[in-house]
Amino acid sequence: MRAGAGVARYLAGRVAAALLVVWAAASVAFLVLHLLPGDPVQIMLGNGYQASPGMADRIRHDYGFDRPLAVQYARFLGRLLHGDLGTSYQQQRPVTAIIGEQLGPTLQLAAAATVLVVLVAGLLALATAGTGAGRGPLARVGRFGRSLVSGVELTAISLPSFWLGILLLTVFSFRLRLLPAAGEGGLAALLLPAVTLALPAAGLLSQVLRDGMQAAWQEPFTLTARSRGLSERAVRARHTLRHAALPALNLAGWFVGHLLGGAVLVETVFARPGLGKVALEAVTSRDIPVVLGVVMAAAAAFAVVSTVVDLLCLAVDPRLRVRRAAV
């Protein structure tokens, strides 16, 4: 009963922290965007149109640009509480509708990239963790294979997303003509963007998993599992991989940021629709409501993923539940 109350108190704190993150992100983005130089009325009308002074004043009054910044900020927070992200300056449509239309392609890309990251990183870590120990030809082959995989992982981490995307396009689309170069036409069109987004994250996650598994190799629970007659494969899959999953799960917050930042470049390179492309166009045209809406969506995604990761950590490691209950 006491343990359950402790975990519930911890979860309530995590939800409060998630709301604080969303509020802080919205406030910082609002202040930065509104303090940038430039007339929002002229941004709405476009550079090719010059409004009369009377029309500009009327637009400024209708949108509340003539109010003090503190009043505009209060109105902005008030709209947020009712789920209203405002109206796009350029498209003259609700921001929620624009984000809702583009959310599907970005979620497809993110889901495909996440599956690839987990599969590639998990397989590489399982195949190379603990190899090369001891002496003899087999150990030397194991060390060489682990060094080779580590080199490939470091290369993947170091590659800029846009350069990797262009390289994949050149090889698989323009030369071999195996996959489409652009668009959103099914799984074939999704593969190259997902690989572009997944490879750097898979390289980093694989290294973290392997280091965690090798550290767990010397732990008493691993020796106990071996003494019970479990095979090396079973020890890896049931014990060391689970132990290494905790630091890997903590990378999920970074991975969300990587997905959102990388999606802007990947969707541009592969001419895909999505939130990344919307964000890039909104920043270029200074469409403040759309930029704020994308920032809010990103902050909310980060907060939700962080909370879910904390719940998964509690489920994976019972010791954490005991610690949270004791706080």
Image (spheres, rainbow, N blue to C red):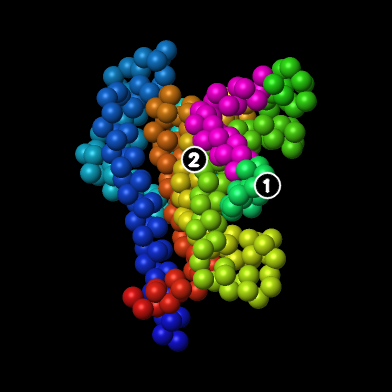
Type of amino acid under label 2 = His
Reply above or below: 83 against 198: below
Residue 238, percent from left and from top: 64, 66
**Image quadrant in which you'd find residue 76:** top left
Q: Which span is picked out in magenta?
A: 142-170
Q: Residue at x 62, y 30 (%)?
A: 272
Q: Nearer the viewer, mark 2 or mark 1?
A: 1
Reply above or below: 209 against 86: below
Residue 148, percent from left and from top: 60, 36
Instruction: Return the residue nearer the eye: 73 or 174.
Output: 174
Instruction: Return the residue nearer the eye: 176 or 191.
Output: 176
Secondary structure state at the residue bearing disc 1: helix
Cα separation, mark 2 vs mark 1, equals: 38 Å
- Give the labeled residue for mark 2: 258
Type of amino acid under label 1 = Leu
Q: Is residue 153 magenta?
A: yes
For the N terminus, give its image quadrant.
bottom left
Number of other residues with Cα within 10 Å of mark 1, as a class: few under 14, some 14 to 19, many 20 or more: few
Q: Residue at x 76, y 20 (%)?
A: 176
**Image quadrant in which you'd find residue 239:** bottom right
Residue 294, percent from left and from top: 46, 40
Residue 103, percent from left and from top: 58, 42
Number of other residues with Cα within 10 Å of mark 2, as a class: few under 14, some 14 to 19, many 20 or more: some
N-terminal of the two: label 2 or label 1?
1
- Give the labeled residue for mark 1: 138
